[in-house]
Image: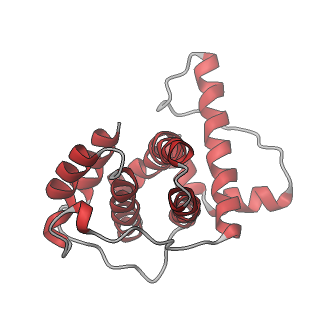
């Protein structure tokens, strides 16, 4: 899974290390906040030699937050060439950070990934000589928005699956009942929701 995720990221960032854009879309701020909180947690765990929970937390983030949700949400935008700068910056930042977090546990494959995807754009000769990652962004409001969008997409996809409808098949309409605050957050991110569903 780590290899496949990094190959996907490598294809998107192959032109070079992206600069931080002036505006990051909500789901990019969501995943950057989740990532930054993971870095804070793992740093404390590693500093106290609590390796097993650190490994589990990194693995959970990679599989469930990054691969299952974020990557699925951005594919449509990439295909339509929407918010590409925001997505490229986010993928590069989170992708390199995940490789650094995994490096103490998987020294060989992380070095291979670093050489293949990031080394041409970074100053360090090895992932094992690079600095430990630092939190990038923590925005609790955007994290909450991202969770609402993620849960909404997951529920509609689960419903489609139960009905025997292909996950990428269009549906005529959905009725959504939620608080006005949640509806506002969903409407703000409607392009991501439509492209994912």
Q: Is residue 48 left or right of residue 181?
A: left
The residue closer to the viewer here, 104 or 9, is 104
Residue that lies at the very extreme toward the right in this rendered image = 179
139 vs 115: above or below: below
Q: Where is residue 137 in the image (x, y as percent from the top left)?
A: 54, 73
Q: Is residue 165 left or right of residue 12?
A: right
91 vs 173: above or below: below
Q: In which quarter of the image is residue 165?
A: top right
Q: Which residue is drawn at 60% across and 72% down?
A: 138
Is residue 172 in sight in this rendering?
A: no
Q: Residue at x 64, y 18 (%)?
A: 162
Q: In this view, does 181 lie to the left or right of 142?
A: right
Q: Position of residue 104 (x, y in %)?
A: 35, 52
Q: Which residue is drawn at 34% across and 71% down?
A: 131
Is residue 46 in sight in this rendering?
A: yes
Residue that lies at the very extreme toward the bottom in this rendered image = 22
């Amino acid at each position: 899974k780590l290899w496949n995720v990094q190959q996907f990221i490598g294809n998107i960032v192959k032109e070079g290390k992206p600069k931080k854009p002036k505006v990051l879309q909500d789901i990019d701020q969501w995943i950057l906040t989740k990532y930054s909180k993971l870095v804070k947690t793992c740093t404390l765990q590693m500093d106290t030699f609590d390796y097993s929970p650190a490994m589990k937390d990194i693995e959970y983030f990679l599989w469930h937050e990054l691969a299952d949700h974020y990557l699925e949400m951005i594919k449509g935008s990439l295909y339509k060439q929407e918010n590409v700068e925001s997505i490229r910056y986010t993928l590069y930042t989170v992708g390199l950070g995940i490789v650094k977090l995994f490096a103490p546990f998987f020294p060989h494959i992380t070095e291979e990934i670093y050489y293949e995807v990031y080394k041409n754009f970074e100053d360090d000769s090895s992932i094992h000589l690079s600095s430990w990652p630092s939190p990038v962004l923590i925005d609790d409001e955007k994290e909450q928005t991202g969770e609402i969008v993620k849960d909404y997409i997951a529920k509609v996809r689960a419903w489609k699956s139960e009905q025997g409808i292909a996950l990428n098949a269009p549906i005529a309409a959905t009725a959504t009942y939620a608080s006005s605050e949640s509806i506002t957050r969903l409407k703000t991110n409607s392009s991501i929701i439509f492209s994912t569903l």
